[in-house]
Image: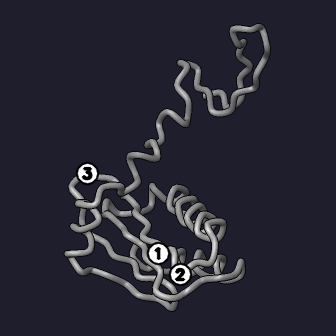
Amino acid sequence: MAFAKECTLKMGERLLMHGVAKDGDTLLSRLPSPKDWHITSQADFAKVFSTRQRSRSHYLHIYWRNDSLERPRLGLAIAMRLTKTAVQRNRLRRGLYEYFRQNLGKLPANDFVISLRRPCYDKACVSQVIAEFKSELNKLV
């Protein structure tokens, strides 16, 4: 597999693509799409909450449920009242999703739902929440 290969675009521009295999398959095409590992429907959230398997830390509740889809999925339930601004809420979501995405291969095929327990108003708190998520998820694996 060649990890860097030049290919020509339609307009004649050259682009260095990373992760392109000899047969044209890309590394990104082999990863599940974000829609495959996000919990989005209210019914799926309700199923996870109803099983009542959970872990608690200072800032987080982590609920999980064994899944028949044979892949891990993550849902976030972050109340607006627990973060001061949308910027903080989105920074928190991006950090949690990114760590989850990086560890997809290590995780069991469970549905995970993360909710905040306490208000989180500053940048240091956001990084602490992400660190707690990492440690709690490592305990579950």
Helix or strand or loop: what does disc 2 sit on? helix
Q: Is residue 12 left or right of residue 27?
A: right
Up the image or down, 111 lies above or below 21; here it is below
Residue at point 55% right, 86% down? 119
The numbered dot on residue 82 is 2
Up the image or down, 133 lies above or below 11; here it is below
Looking at the picture, how far across and down is residue 41, in whole percent?
A: 30, 55
Residue at point 71% right, 16% down? 7
Looking at the picture, how far across and down is residue 31, in whole percent?
A: 48, 41
- Point out the tag, 3 or 1, that comes first from the N-terminus: 3
Helix or strand or loop: what does disc 3 sit on? loop
Q: At label 3, which amino acid type do we have?
A: Leu
**Which quadrant of the view contains residue 96?**
bottom right
**Which quadrant of the view contains residue 130?**
bottom right
Tell me whether circle 1 and circle 2 mark residues in contact (CB < 8 Å). yes
- Point out the tag, 2 or 3, that comes first from the N-terminus: 3
Q: Which marked residue is nearer to the observer: mark 3 or mark 1?
A: 1
Q: Quadrant of the N terminus?
A: top right
The residues tagged by marks 3 and 1 sit, at their Cα atoms, a distance apart of 27 Å
Up the image or down, 7 lies above or below 141; here it is above
The numbered dot on residue 64 is none
The numbered dot on residue 69 is 3
The residues tagged by marks 2 and 3 sit, at their Cα atoms, a distance apart of 32 Å
Q: At label 2, which amino acid type do we have?
A: Leu
